Image (tube, rainbow, N blue to C red):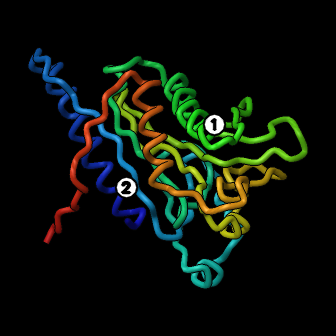
Amino acid sequence: MPYQEAWDFQEQIFKEIVQLKIDNRRNETQLVTPNYFFFVTHPHVYTLGKSGDVRHLLANENELSRRGATFVKTNRGGDITYHGPGQIVGYPILDLENFFTDIHKYLRLLEEVIIQTLADFGIVATRSEGETGVWLDVNTPFARKICAMGVRASRWVTMHGFALNVNTDLEYFNAIIPCGIKNKAVTSMQAELKTEVDDSEVKQRILKHFESIFEARLVPTPDVLIKDPN
């Protein structure tokens, strides 16, 4: 799904949850707020977080066109990153008041979901202090990022999420300074394991660990269809 289309859909869900919370407070009701977890893969796109530096995009319009990529300024946290085929993007839209009210804890638990998922495939990953996301060989000259994260939250409702490189073409990261962090590489599960990875299996592992870590039960739903506004 194109990035802007997915972002618009997230905003729709996000606003509905926020409005329900506002109505609950105004009307002194206790209607339960829903929580969602969406998987998506985007066509080639570079996205810049609200606190990011556009100078971290190293490609001009002609280069973007050559790569078949677009560029979008978004309202998530973090700097610049790449999304594209072979990458699993996860967008949890949660009312954290159903879980806990701590954004830092939320990010650390999202990281833990990915760390445990990678461990299932024999990849030893960890956190890098002061650098959100999931990394390999931290504090060595070979430190490299395998999963980027950037979220937005308002009234304890989250949107955006993580991007895990599974069978991603890492050449696309050469057009940016990923997450604004210089002199550190980016990797993928395929690059680490030297073989193509079944992304459906990765998704199942992510969901399994998400349920365990967030103490939640995920209920599968049919593919989400975006209504044509016309």
Q: Residues within 10 Å of mark 1 (few under 14, many from 20)?
A: few
Name the amino acid, label 1: Ala
Give left or right: position of 152 versus 71.
Answer: left
Which of pointers 1 and 2 indicates the residue nearer the eye? 1
x 43%, y 44%: residue: 204
In the image: residue 30, left or right of residue 114: left
**What x and y, as percent, mark residue 229?**
16, 67
16 relative to 178 in the view: left or right: left
Q: Which amino acid does the dot numbered 2 rest on?
A: Trp
Q: Residue furthest right?
A: 141
In primary-sequence order, the first of circles 1 and 2 is 2
Query: Alpha-carbon neighbours of circle 2 within 10 Å: few (<14), some, or many (≥20)?
Result: some
Q: Quadrant of the N terminus?
A: bottom left
Tag 1's secondary structure? Answer: helix
Q: Is residue 40 above or below residue 102?
A: below
Answer with left or right where residue 30 lies relative to residue 143: left
Res 7 label? 2
Image coordinates for residue 106, horizontal then vertical, percent: 49, 27
Tell me the residue at 30%/39% (across/down): 36
Q: Which mark is residue 119?
A: 1
